[in-house]
Image (cartoon, grey):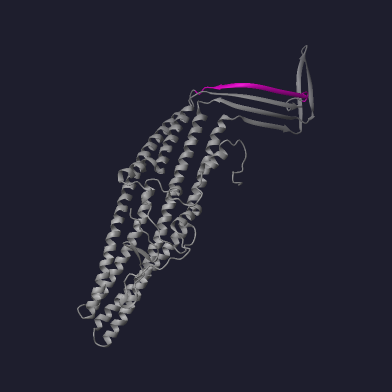
Amino acid sequence: MRRSRIGRGEMLHGSRRIWVGGIAAGMAACVAIPLTVLPARSETLEAALVQAYQNNPSLNSQRAATRAIDEGVPQALAGYRPKVTVTGTGGEQTSSTTSKSITAGVGTWSTLAGYNGPASVGATVTQTLYNGFQTANKTRQAESAVLAARATLRVTEQTVLLNGATAYMNLLRDGAILDLQRRNVEVLQEQLRQTRDRFNVGEVTRTDVAQAESSLAAGRSQVLLAEANYTASVATYRQVIGVEPGKLAPASPVDRFSPHNLPGAVAVGTATNPAVATAEYNVDVALLAVKVAEGALYPTVSVQGSYSQNWLSTQSLATMNSYNAAVLGTLSVPIYQGGAEYSLIRQAKETLGQQRLALDTARDQIRQNVVQAWGQLEAAKANIDATQAQVQASEIALNGVREEARVGQRTTFDVLTAQQTLVNARVALVTAQHDRVVASYTLLSAVGRLSPDVLGLHVAAYDATVHYKQVRDSWAGVRTPDGR
């Protein structure tokens, strides 16, 4: 397995490394020189991915969303639990009652009036015994939603890690290209100085000087463009990784973690990619939603116990004390409720069909992503060999053109053209090495294996089950497990 590494100002060349900015001034330009020793404390791609895994706000936001969805399970389980209500009343009232009674045809009027301070306390306990299995189905639905949220979190983790690897490699590439362009300007400045010296002694014409000046201006323009690209890559790195970049070390592809052939990669991707798992759990959620909606057509059985103690009365001044206690069962059979329940069932079935189609779409999308990533990786591997050969040939051609120019067989324009060809070849090699590493991470993401555990990152993996276990059987309390 070929493993390539690329660092800022460095690129591979066969079995040896060369310094991409090693275009020495004057006649020794563009000759490969030994690699300068990397800084002792260079930041690695693995360390950058750890930073992104810990600090990326998009990932932390999705973790919070997953924790919020965990609360759907205790909410559904509440349907199994009793509902307890305690009431109390008290106050002052005035009352006046006039009544009429007739005795032997003679009417007698009497009035009862006065003040009292009635008070009462009471408690009611209600327990649902049967509701068409709605509570059971809602609980299973909430659990499926939790599993879907965890799979979505895995998708976000993969996206963040892939973006982190891409941002790291983009910064390495743009830094190397910037060094190349700056050193190219140094070479062009030396070429212009030599051309002017030769013009002063009559060896070349004013046209040669103008050509050298034009090439230098074009080189400076490329430096400005490279600086802009590098600045943009620094900003993207800061956004994705969460910290300012330091000295970046070379990075290696991760082909060893991916399947070794395309059919195997497609099979693994369509079976284990978290995007497919999310779609599968969403089908379960939709199926259980149909069952919950159908539960509204079934009878409901509940039992209620109540007790109240009253002192004085709000109804009669003559009542001094009373109490009431009862245990009652209730059977409720829905006959017709306007047709809304039937509409909800039909709607849930249509949603189920839509989620099943979304699952097929997700599998097709993953297959397309895997095939595309595989093709890009194979092309990147072949492109490295081609650009390495291009660099070698361009170096030989440049040296030959310079030697021929010394004896008058080549013009200044030929030398400048060969110089630019070599720079372009080196830029192409740096880009190919960048693409090689990024494509390996893209393939690993497409098959669903881009995770801290697979990459061997030295970071504690986020365990979504911890919060779920903390809140699942919670009966009361408003504080979250982290203390908020």
Q: Is residue 319 magenta?
A: yes
Question: Residue 23, percent across and down?
Answer: 34, 72
- Near-viewer residue (414 or 42): 42
Q: Main secondary structure of the magenta part?
A: strand
- Residue under the point 50% across and 27% down: 133
Where is residue 38, by image quadrant?
bottom left
Where is residue 315, by image quadrant?
top right
Q: Is residue 122 magenta?
A: no
Say whether residue 82 is left or right of residue 431. Answer: right
Where is residue 323, by image quadrant?
top right
- Residue under the point 67% across and 31% down: 86
Residue at the bottom extreme of this rendering: 201
Against 276, is 426 above or below? below
Question: Residue 383, percent across and down?
Answer: 29, 58
Against 476, is 127 above or below? above
Residue at the top extreme of this rendering: 104
Residue 210 appears in the rendering: yes
- Near-viewer residue (253 or 326): 253
Question: Residue 299, percent across and down?
Answer: 51, 23
Say whether residue 444 is left or right of residue 206. Answer: right
- Residue under the point 61% across and 29% down: 82
Range drawn in magenta: 317-334
Say whether residue 435 is left or right of residue 111. Answer: left
Residue 216 appears in the rendering: no
Question: Residue 256, percent across and down?
Answer: 37, 50
- Residue under the point 49% across and 22% down: 335
Callout count: 0
